[in-house]
Image: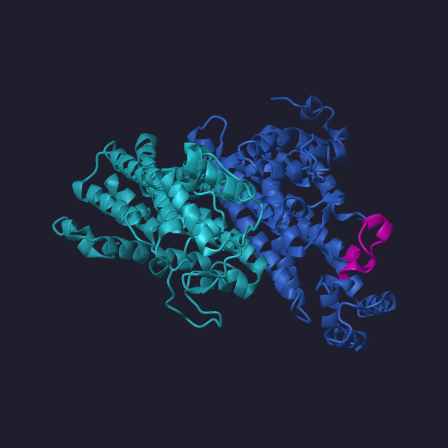
Chain colours: A cyan, B blue
Amino acid sequence: MRVDSRLDSQSTEATVTVPDLLERGRTLCTPLLREAVGRLAAPMDTVAAYHFGWIDRDGRPSSGDGGKAVRPALALLSAQAVGADPQTGAAGGAAVELVHNFSLLHDDLMDGDETRRHRATAWTVFGPAQAILAGDALFALATEVLLDAPDGSAIQASAAARAVRRITVATRKLIDGQAQDLSFEHRDRVTVEECLEMEGNKTGALLACASSIGAVLAGADDRTADALERYGYHLGLAFQAVDDLLGIWGATEVTGKPHWGDLRQRKKSLPVSAALAEGGKASLRLAELLADPEGRGHEDEEQLAVRAALIEEAGGRAWTQDEARRCHQTALAALDEVPMPDAVRRHFVALAEFVVVRER
Amino acid sequence: MRVDSRLDSQSTEATVTVPDLLERGRTLCTPLLREAVGRLAAPMDTVAAYHFGWIDRDGRPSSGDGGKAVRPALALLSAQAVGADPQTGAAGGAAVELVHNFSLLHDDLMDGDETRRHRATAWTVFGPAQAILAGDALFALATEVLLDAPDGSAIQASAAARAVRRITVATRKLIDGQAQDLSFEHRDRVTVEECLEMEGNKTGALLACASSIGAVLAGADDRTADALERYGYHLGLAFQAVDDLLGIWGATEVTGKPHWGDLRQRKKSLPVSAALAEGGKASLRLAELLADPEGRGHEDEEQLAVRAALIEEAGGRAWTQDEARRCHQTALAALDEVPMPDAVRRHFVALAEFVVVRER
């Protein structure tokens, strides 16, 4: 199936841009997503379609923002990395997107978030129970989509089973990561190692799966799949380090999130953990402020600015910037372990740049 | 592996009782469940272990009530139905039990239930977020347990993939059923067909999977697996019909549930739907009472007794009793489609009797 001949053509592959890759991911994976969601009984199908932005709260068709679709783009590329056509990775891209949206439906409820992608979150529209169930259903559909092998051959069935196994383990890690993140809220400090483990679980594991699942579906061996997973895992860690920096120092007008947002929520992010680990004067003062139950949750702008300055003075900001760079480099180095067409490698590099280098 | 030689021995197979079958299910499946739950990171492992009754709320070992374990017993029997040893079905029994407990963790939260198996529900002890995540994690583990084939042969891998596919579809139906059940709460009436569809999804689908998954893991063909699924599906419908009867007319001292419990909750159960469909004088009076917004949720004992009497007068009780018998018979008839050892068939029949004929 040739959906976008421009991307299949060897001669113009060099001119493909990141928006092209993202668009291709959407084009090949969205039909599978819609078909899968169409299997759900009422009212689950409505909740899921609303969450994906396909309908508005009154059931009218909508062209809502379905997210950046980085994961589908990576899944298609990973099929190409082992010489298959992008279409081979489409079921993997759809499955990863289903798991991602399963976690968003549950996380929005657990975190009490009322908006996502500039729309009211599903739980605020349909109630908590339907949001939980819709998430559960998307998780089930992810497995189904992978096992709906187009021709049902034994080779494809075995590749699909391997893909299911990898995405299931990744999903369990994602769940572990969210549980760790929530449990950190009740602690005054977490170590840098704990924070990295949580972020690797919460963000790294599914990006790792997205970056390898197309190759797995194309029958790649475990060594190749593992190398592609390392690319995605470190890409996830780099993304998360940048996210942690933006959560404190990101400009509100760019991120759309409140100033000092993560400090206000007392989030145990990387800059905070690294600053607390440093142990110098600013580090100790920061620890005192964070452990003080007085005024908790009611800090004013000035108090939050003091904390941000202490984190910076204790080296938390610089350490996290270095960590983002290190992870970005480790991700790119993993690509060198897999022989792949130059154009595909350049696309992986361009997507990594897109994911890591950003202001929001 | 011979865990219980008494059950493997052909000569004494005839003396095996239902408690023996349930105990064997627990004995073979619990180690797999514990191993799976042990893979979870803290704090998820604690939440799951508490839910299964292995530890108390302070983390001390406990021998809590883990449920009747009917599903594991069925999974082992279904392996024996196609000539395999019970152990072949153990991963299937563990997987079905993980899915069942995933749904209990989420349902207890959605329904606001504060006790289960005489203990505080997980969400009341660890909070809603951890209960949601623990449920999600058990769902993931169900797939993992099936794909952890002991010898990794191609035949086993293909059988495991087929088992994953069946349990995933069953889980999606279970989720659909819970969503339908919740959506019925906001309606004055549902048809008998809608009620049967909901109950088939919520209870039938997973019992169907439990009754066939051992055979699927043993390499049975789809025709055999489908026949065993029909047994389990109708067993589920019969169980649910009896549950609906007990929900209205069950003796509180036996069920442990409040008198007229389902009527108090205005549950759209089978006796109610059947009575409303009848259309006679009692049926119309019942419809009036149920549609009346006045005093909703504050009905006294006497008002509830009037409703129970109207349901009975309109034939709702008798119809549901007949339906339970019909489904029980249909379940047993499905067994005749599968050639299996006589002793195995007798055990299936005994388990069906155990599931359907009960007072609580």
- Is residue A43 at least partly visible in the picture? no
- Seen in the picture, residue A141 relative to B159 is either above or below; the reply is below
x, y percent for residue B314 = 80, 70
Quarter of the image where the N terminus of chain A is located = bottom left
x, y percent for residue A165 = 44, 38
Image side of residue B243 versus residue A225, left or right: right
Camera-nearest residue between A138 and A275:
A275
Report the residue at 20% width, 44% height from top.
A346
Image side of residue B179 versus residue B114, left or right: left
- Seen in the picture, residue A84 relative to A2 is either above or below; the reply is above
Camera-nearest residue between A180 and A157:
A180
Farthest left residue?
A11
Tell me the chief SS of the magenta region. Answer: helix
- Seen in the picture, residue B113 relative to A341 is either above or below; the reply is below
Quarter of the image where the C terminus of chain A is located = bottom left
Q: Which residues are magenta?
A: B245-262
Classify residue A27 by image quadrant. bottom left
Camera-nearest residue between B299 and A179:
A179
Classify residue B266 by image quadrant. bottom right
